[in-house]
Amino acid sequence: MLRFISFLCAVMLWCGITPEIALALTQNPATADSIQPYLDRVMQRITEFKLDNGMKFIVLERNQAPVVSFLTYADVGGANEPEGKTGVAHFLEHLAFKGTTRIGTKDYKAEKPILDKLDSLWQQIQSAKAAGKQQEVAKLEAEFQKLEAQASELVKQNELGQIVEKAGGVGLNATTSTDATRYFYSFPSNKLELWMSLESERFLDPVFREFFKEKEVILEERRMRVENSPIGMMLEAFIDKAYTEHPYRRPVIGYDRDLRNLSREDVAEFFQTYYVPNNLTLAVVGDVKAAEVKRLAEIYFGRYPAKPKPQSTLKPEPKQTETREVTLRLPTQPWYLEGYHQPAMNHPDYVIYELIGSLLSEGRTSRLYKSLVEQQRIALTAQGFSGFPGDKYPSMMLFYALTAPGHSVDEVAKALQSEINRLKTEPVSAKELERVKTQARAELLRSLDSNSGMASSLVEYEVKTGSWKNLFKELETIEAVTPADIQRVANTTFVPENRTIGRLLPKEG
């Protein structure tokens, strides 16, 4: 729902809806339908087209300011990684900033044979370690370090970022999730062709340089997120317990052993499989003309050869039939986690799960805060949300609470279950449900969005639901939810056989 809230906020501002009008809409739910003409107006500004190679573009013309935001969305994330090679999608995201045969290098002809030799030496080191040949390992590692130093001398550090920054670009970044990898930044609108050139070359002619240095960066990132974080370790153990087959059970950062064994060849193979034209969707939002975007896209991205779209081989998660539990003892305050399997984002009931999350967790008027934190004072925080750890495939609704001093996770579990059971046995009052819907509309006044936010929302709905147009239908879907819908979903979802419990307890002794 937050994606939709941010999206709708941007729509209202773009279409000239003043704060006074917005406030009226939030205070009088009956007038929410009057937003639709503004949504229709935005839809008329959107153009979509597909290149001959299968690459798709979504363009939203917004001419209020001479800026434009870009998003390249690769329909591949942690869930698509081969067994034994977890973390490769995230690794590739890091390497996508290292440049090409022309960007990021002083002399690629001299650099390439060194990179190839480093790959060969690394394989030899792995073999020598496996054979227990320590002297040979030491000799090979010394040679490896010398070659790595030579390779570094040929690198132009962060040249891609410097080009973007000098041209007025901001926000150059990327993210990897279970479902997708997103690359994004914004430019002045007169730099449209520069973006076309840089972004097309970036994925047409990448060089995965500084691979082994970046591996150490990612291993350190994993140590910070997981090994040195009790809640990070708990989440990894929890999701591994909650899933038995589907790759949502694996961490996006990857397992330590897999990261250490990844080769540059593994990353290149993953790239060749998933970074094909018909697995990429690009959004352009801002001060542009769709016809010009299409003309330049055909010149720059039309260079990509068409390739078969990768076929999904993901194992579906079997229906859970009994409560699962996992307990960790670490130096930490006690945490309690409870999760239930739920449908994917494209399911008709998905918005109901989001509203349930809001009823239980949205702000100080939410049920969990009022009961566990404010009234009983058994938790310092208590919240829940849908779509964990992703939402492209059937996922989970996760509840979590940090236990207050002097109280136990069992007390928290009992209180949480009481609030969940209320949803099952007592219809939510029309007033409380409307409060949650009103909160969604009121958020428009507090959450100003950007071109980049709109680009992200459009592509997300396009890929995960089949059409960006579904984004514009979500307000209607939210308004249609009834107390009976909440009760129906709660009764089918929050049952013991669909539950996974996690307890993070202080280390004994």
Image: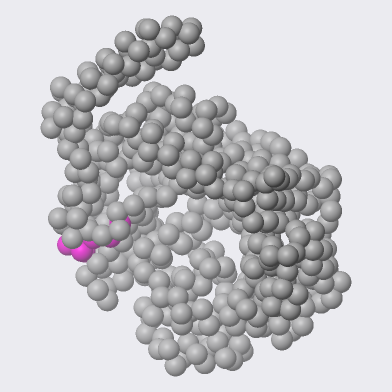
Residue 184 shows in the view: yes
Spot occupied by residue 92 in the image (x, y as percentages of width and height): 39, 37
Rendered view: 145 above or below 230: above
Q: Residue 481 sits in which quadrant? A: bottom right
Spot occupied by residue 403 in the image (x, y as percentages of width and height): 69, 62
Q: Nearer the viewer, residue 120 or 311?
A: 120
Q: Nearer the viewer, residue 255 or 438?
A: 255
Q: Residue at x 36, y 69 (%)?
A: 450
Spot occupied by residue 469 in the image (x, y as percentages of width and height): 50, 64
The extreme right residue here reads: 425
Rendered view: 224 above or below 87: below
* Colour option used: one colour
Q: Residue 266 sits in which quadrant? A: top left
Residue 476 shows in the view: no
Q: Residue 271 sits in which quadrant? A: top left
Does the segment drawn in magenta span residue 463?
no
Q: Residue at x 51, y 32 (%)?
A: 256
Q: Is residue 155 left or right of residue 32?
A: left
Spot occupied by residue 394 in the image (x, y as percentages of width and height): 66, 49
Does the segment drawn in magenta span residue 190?
yes
Residue span colored magenta:
185-191
Quarter in which the N terminus is drawn: bottom right
Q: Residue at x 28, y 31 (%)?
A: 209
Rendered view: 71 above or below 30: above
Quarter in which the C terminus is drawn: top right
